[in-house]
Image: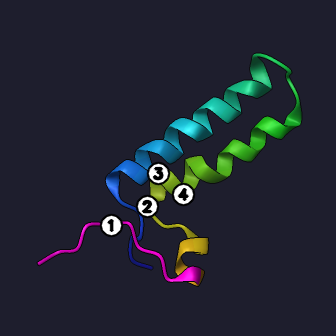
Amino acid sequence: MSRNEGTLDRALRIIAGLVLISLVFIGPQTAWGWVGLVPLLTGLVGVCPLYSLLGINTCALKS
């Protein structure tokens, strides 16, 4: 699978994932914070399966 997430998209996903995971330890302390693993992992890997299904690519085109 080739990368389909741009730099800004990846950074936002990583930040959102870390914020959601922090909710497990700080704040309401519910298990819903573990949902943050999804954006964190997709941001670290650079591939979003949903983007692939929908044909979306936020990666800069190489010339």
The image position of residue 17, as x and y in percent, is 61, 40
Q: Is residue 60 magenta?
A: yes
- Cα separation between marks 1 and 4: 14 Å
Residue projecting furthest to the top: 26
Q: Quadrant of residue 23?
A: top right
Of badges 1 and 3, the one in the foreground is 1
Q: Is residue 35 magenta?
A: no
Most common secondary structure along the magenta stretch: loop
Q: Is residue 3 above or below residue 22?
A: below
Instruction: Give the camera-side residue of 55 and 21.
Output: 55
Q: Which residue is mark 4?
A: 42
Callout 3 amino acid: Leu
The earlier-in-sequence mark between 1 and 2 is 2
The reply to whether discs 3 and 4 touch (Cβ–Cβ < 8 Å) is yes
Q: Secondary structure at mark 1?
A: loop
Residue drawn at x 25%, y 67% is 60
The reply to whether discs 1 and 2 touch (Cβ–Cβ < 8 Å) is yes
Q: Which residue is mark 1?
A: 59
Residue drawn at x 51%, y 36% is 15
